[in-house]
Image (tube, helix red, strand yellow):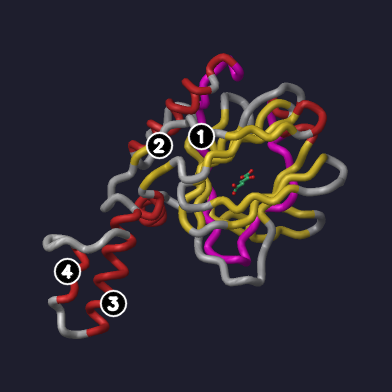
């Protein structure tokens, strides 16, 4: 940050006498400055970097694509009708270790910037994907105990066709891992604070992805996954 000018927020906070108030206001201002004072918007997709994986799979990454991600995190945490689900696993029914909400094709998304994100991704990948992104699956990882196990998105066309799944992450970073289906060396991506990660090509059927549990302190993260029709 540069030298504070007369009307800068830094000078403003120094007029407060109580040091804890000064600390709190300074932290709030710094967070707000970084976060665009509550504005949420998309950067350009010009910084996207592709990594080719094996078997025709690839991953595109653009750090910090969604500006104001902390504000969006707060809004989604408050406004999305999160569901705690239970699923059968072998001979038991277990809690799904994350909160979920699925916005199907045609459902109104909870924040306009998510419509913008879906449309920008559809435009960017129009030639390669040949169809728009249509659904948005949201996952809320409350802390390091929440997770998603190794899987590919293969309920639907992802089992047989090349496709794309675009993930925008807001809130604290978590590790998203990728490994070839059936095992092999894994890749690790730290995703949070507006990062974009897109899995494409054969990725859903030849690779698996996971967000593992962690014992390290982990703040909450929300993942927004955009998918084309009939990919889940
Ligand atoms: O949290 C993520 O980014 C991954 C979510 C995911 O893999 C899924 O819901 O299928």
| Front residue of 112 and 216 | 216
Please report whichever mark, 4 or 3, sits nearer to the chain's N-terminal start.
4
Q: Give the number of the disc on residue 23.
A: 3
Q: Position of residue 89 (x, y in %)?
A: 76, 54
Distance of label 4 from label 2 (alpha carbons): 30 Å
Name the residue located 47 percent from the left edge and 31 percent from the top edge.
45
- Residue that mark 4 sits on: 11
Quadrant location of the N terminus? bottom left
- The total of numbered circles placed on residues is 4
Which picture quadrant has residue 85? bottom right
Distance of label 4 from label 3 (alpha carbons): 13 Å
Distance of label 2 from label 1 (alpha carbons): 9 Å
Q: Secondary structure at mark 3?
A: helix
Q: Secondary structure at mark 2?
A: loop
- The stretch in magenta equals 128-156
Q: Is residue 90 left or right of residue 188?
A: right
Vertical arrangement, residue 82 with respect to residue 26, above or below: above
| Front residue of 148 and 166 | 166
Discs 4/2, front = 4
- Residue that mark 1 sits on: 47
Please report whichever mark, 4 or 1, sits nearer to the chain's N-terminal start.
4
Q: Position of residue 4 (x, y in %)?
A: 21, 63
| Front residue of 111 and 106 | 111
Q: Give the number of the disc on residue 192.
A: none
Magenta stretch contains residue 154: yes
Q: Position of residue 143 (x, y in %)?
A: 56, 66
Q: Residues within 10 Å of mark 2 (few under 14, many from 20)?
A: some
Residues at badges 3 and 1 in contact (C-beta under 8 Å)? no
């Amino acid at each position: 940050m540069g030298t504070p000018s007369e009307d800068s927020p830094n000078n403003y906070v120094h007029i407060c006498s109580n040091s804890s108030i000064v600390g709190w206001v300074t932290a709030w201002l710094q967070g707000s400055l970084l976060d665009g004072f509550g504005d949420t918007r998309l950067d350009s997709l010009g910084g996207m970097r592709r990594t080719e994986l094996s078997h025709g799979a690839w991953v595109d990454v653009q750090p910090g694509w969604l500006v104001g991600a902390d504000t969006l995190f707060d809004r989604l945490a408050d406004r999305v009708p999160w569901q705690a689900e239970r699923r059968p696993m072998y001979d038991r029914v277990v809690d799904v270790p994350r909160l979920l909400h699925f916005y199907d094709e045609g459902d109104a998304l909870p924040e306009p910037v998510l419509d913008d994100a879906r449309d920008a991704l559809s435009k960017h990948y129009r030639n390669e994907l040949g169809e728009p992104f249509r659904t948005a699956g949201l996952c809320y990882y409350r802390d390091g105990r929440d997770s998603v196990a190794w899987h590919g998105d293969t309920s639907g066309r992802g089992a047989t066709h090349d496709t794309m799944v675009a993930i925008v992450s807001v809130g604290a970073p978590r590790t998203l891992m990728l490994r070839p289906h059936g095992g092999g060396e894994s890749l690790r991506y730290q995703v949070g604070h507006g990062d974009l990660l897109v899995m494409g090509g054969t990725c859903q059927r030849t690779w698996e992805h996971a967000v593992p549990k962690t014992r390290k302190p982990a703040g909450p993260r929300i993942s927004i996954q955009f998918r084309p029709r009939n990919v889940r």
